[in-house]
Image (cartoon, grey):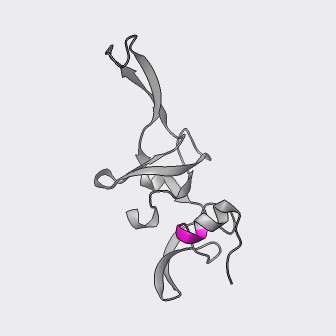
Amino acid sequence: MAKRIRQGDTVVVMSGDDKGKRGKVLRLVLEKNRVVVEGVNLVYKHLRKSQQHPQGGRIRREAAVHISNVMPVDNETNRATRVKSGVVDGKRVRVGVRSGGEVGGAAGKKAAAGGKKED
């Protein structure tokens, strides 16, 4: 199940309290089929008093969400899409079911940077 989402992908949360939010995948927890998404599922972590934090306190940080609750964003349509495996230029890549275009990877970096895709 983890092959459809990779670190660095932009994903949309499909269910839960943060439904509809978008963010970048910061970390994968493959043993538990979970992902940590930037700005999603924020929780408070309480800090004990220490030399680094003399007052103690609490900070907000992202907690993991189940991988089934997120979908990758298609680079061409900018909407959530399911992912299948396909071959482009002799390489196996992830392909969005919605548009048939490549998801993430080099195509995602070009789209995010505003560059044009080569035909």
In this rendering, the answer to whether 3 lies above or below 30 is below
> Is residue 88 part of the magenta span, yes or no?
no
Question: Which quarter shows the C terminus?
Answer: bottom right
> Is residue 106 part of the magenta span, yes or no?
yes
In this rendering, the answer to whether 110 lies above or below 17 is below
Residue at 31% across, 51% down = 32
Residue at 48% across, 77% down = 93
What secondary structure is the stretch in magenta mostly built from? helix
Label tally: 0
Query: Looking at this view, is 13 or 111 the one in front?
Result: 111
Question: Which quarter shows the N terminus?
Answer: bottom left
In this rendering, the answer to whether 25 lies above or below 62 is below
Residue furthest bottom in the image: 90
Q: Position of residue 18 (x, y in %)?
A: 56, 41
Q: Position of residue 37 (x, y in %)?
A: 49, 46
Magenta range is 103-107
> In screen coordinates, is 74 left or right of 27?
right
Q: Is residue 74 visible?
A: no
Q: Position of residue 39 (x, y in %)?
A: 54, 40
Residue at 71% across, 72% down = 116
Q: Position of residue 3 (x, y in %)?
A: 40, 67
Query: Looking at this view, is 67 or 87 the one in front?
Result: 87
Residue furthest front in the image: 51
Residue at 50% across, 82% down = 86
Q: Is residue 106 visible?
A: yes
Residue furthest left in the image: 31
